[in-house]
Image (cartoon, grey):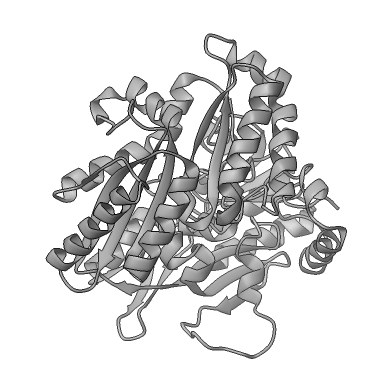
């Protein structure tokens, strides 16, 4: 391996090939569930260098783990424990290459942090609508590799819908330049869509051309207290009817999830935390004026209150209050971590079936594991719930995971499958769910996925053991 290390140093510079010291930032996953050992962490500064690294590793038969901001939640971007994998970090590639104002697009390197992409769009007079809790750390390449979702999927779609073109280094070390800003290109297979969501198993995304949107004239945020999941679904339908495309966010948060925020982050002052089983966070973006948006928003909430869909509500008076409300929502994962280790789920279910799913699955879990606590929250507007399971109060959280994690996962995933849902809505499969996928994906779909993997990465050097086996 010494020869490969020297070759990598010649390609990207000795300072950008890390083999010693504390490499935990690259070797340990975001949730600290897994820690591997890399042969080296390689940090190329250009697409040409990425291609050279891939060719060198392929020639040596060494597998590669592409990595962006290392904020993934399914152990998909860290090396295994063998000490024989190269971590390919794209973080040095962080240039905004171009903004095309007339075409409403921007082209960026894969290592650009999502928040930097948002800020670059804003400075150009536009908006890039992808928004995640990890936006200050995650990279656009990682967002594309996992087809990340976030809080505005309801209006703008997942990352897949926000991308018009890609630049990718293949497993053979060749560069595919697909950075067109075309919205129509009907010239055969859509290669871009193969690489988006493939979690670095088919190619290394090095750049992307992204959609930009005009900034809304006004954005308003409201918090509503809701008596049940069923009423929240009815409120969603009413909001979609009244606000149409103006409804850009609709988040559901269970009482226990909010109580954890209130307990561990009391400075955030959670509205109605003791008064209602659920909270809903709504966002309305209007192209006309703030006065027009506020009038429509307040009329919606008044009618929802009259219909019994909510029991109380508050509309943010200014941007600072809106940020405060969103901060509460985004603090739920942190508060849950403060409470102790837990079993996380990132599931999607048809919106119409979510109330029945929650009622039935809640009861099953309580029957199987008395005292278990449910941290249910997520993007109700697009059917994506983070249906998480916390140990009984006062229990040993690590022991709970050891004893019950697989059992809880099986119960929840079986229920998701029964309700025609998906065991991964926006986090991906990674290593964490790769053994579960065959139980819930059709054999035909899995065979097709393996065929694609074999065709694009015949050596199996790109992120092996993730998404699909074989």
Residue at horizontal 75 percent and vertical 58 percent from the top:
58
> Would residue 297 be found to the left or right of residue 88 on screen?
left
Residue 259: where, in percent of width, then height?
38, 25
Question: Can see residue 235?
Answer: yes
Question: Can you give x and y, in whole percent of width and height, for residue 449 in the image?
Answer: 79, 63
Locate residue 191: give its quadrant: bottom right
Which residue appears at 62% of the width and 43% of the height? Answer: 357
Q: Position of residue 460 (x, y in %)?
A: 80, 56
Judge from the rendering whether residue 272 lies leftward or rightward of residue 97; answer left or right.
Answer: left
Corner quadrant of residue 160: bottom right
Q: Position of residue 382 (x, y in %)?
A: 50, 57
Q: Quadrant of residue 197?
A: bottom right
Camera-nearest residue between 278 and 268: 278
Residue shown at 54% from the left, 41% from the top: 386
> Is 102 located above or below residue 447 in the figure?
below
> Which quarter of the rendering shows the N terminus?
top right
x 58%, y 58%: residue: 145
In the depicted view, which residue is nearer to us: 347 or 186?
347
Against 411, residue 4 (above or below) is below
- Judge from the rendering whether residue 387 lies leftward or rightward of residue 443; answer left or right: left
Residue 390, placed above or below residue 454: above
């Amino acid at each position: 391996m010494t020869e490969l290390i020297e070759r990598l140093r010649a390609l990207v510079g000795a300072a950008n090939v890390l083999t010693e010291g504390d490499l935990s930032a690259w070797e340990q996953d975001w949730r600290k569930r897994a820690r591997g050992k890399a042969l080296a962490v390689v940090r190329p500064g250009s697409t040409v260098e990425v291609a050279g690294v891939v060719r060198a590793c392929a020639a040596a038969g060494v597998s590669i783990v592409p990595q962006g901001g290392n904020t993934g939640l399914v152990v998909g971007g860290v090396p295994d424990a063998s000490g024989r994998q190269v971590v390919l970090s794209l973080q040095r590639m962080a240039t905004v290459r171009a903004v095309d104002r007339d075409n409403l697009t921007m082209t960026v390197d894969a290592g650009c942090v999502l928040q930097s992409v948002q800020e670059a769009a804003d400075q150009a007079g536009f908006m890039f609508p992808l928004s995640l809790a990890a936006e200050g750390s995650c990279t656009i390449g990682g967002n594309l590799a996992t087809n990340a979702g976030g809080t505005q999927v309801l209006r703008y779609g997942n990352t897949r819908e926000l991308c018009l073109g890609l630049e990718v280094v293949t497993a053979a070390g060749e560069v595919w330049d697909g950075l067109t800003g075309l919205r129509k290109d009907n010239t055969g297979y859509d290669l871009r869509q193969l690489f988006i969501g493939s979690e670095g198993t088919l190619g290394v995304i090095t750049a992307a051309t992204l959609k930009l949107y005009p900034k809304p004239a006004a954005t308003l945020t409201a918090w509503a207290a809701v008596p049940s999941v069923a009423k929240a679904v009815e409120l969603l339908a009413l909001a979609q009817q009244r606000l149409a495309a103006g409804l850009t966010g609709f988040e559901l948060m269970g009482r226990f999830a909010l109580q954890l925020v209130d307990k561990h982050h009391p400075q955030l002052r959670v509205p109605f935390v003791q008064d209602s089983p659920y909270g809903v966070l709504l966002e309305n973006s209007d192209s006309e004026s703030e006065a027009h948006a506020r009038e429509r928003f307040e009329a919606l909430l008044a009618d929802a209150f009259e219909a019994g869909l909510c029991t109380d509500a508050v509309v943010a008076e200014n941007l600072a209050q809106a940020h405060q409300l969103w901060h509460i929502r985004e603090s739920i994962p942190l508060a849950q971590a403060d409470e102790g280790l837990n079993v996380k789920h990132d599931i999607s279910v048809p919106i119409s079936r979510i109330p029945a799913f929650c009622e039935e699955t809640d009861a099953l879990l309580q029957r199987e594991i008395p005292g278990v606590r449910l941290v249910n929250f997520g993007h109700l507007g697009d059917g994506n719930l983070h249906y998480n399971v916390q140990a009984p109060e006062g229990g040993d959280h690590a022991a709970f995971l050891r004893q019950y994690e697989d059992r809880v996962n099986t119960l929840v995933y079986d229920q998701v499958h029964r309700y025609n849902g998906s065991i991964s809505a926006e986090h991906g499969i990674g290593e964490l769910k790769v053994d579960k996928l065959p139980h819930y994906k059709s054999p035909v779909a899995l065979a097709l996925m393996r065929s694609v993997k074999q065709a694009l990465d015949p050596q199996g050097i790109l992120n092996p053991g993730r998404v699909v086996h074989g």
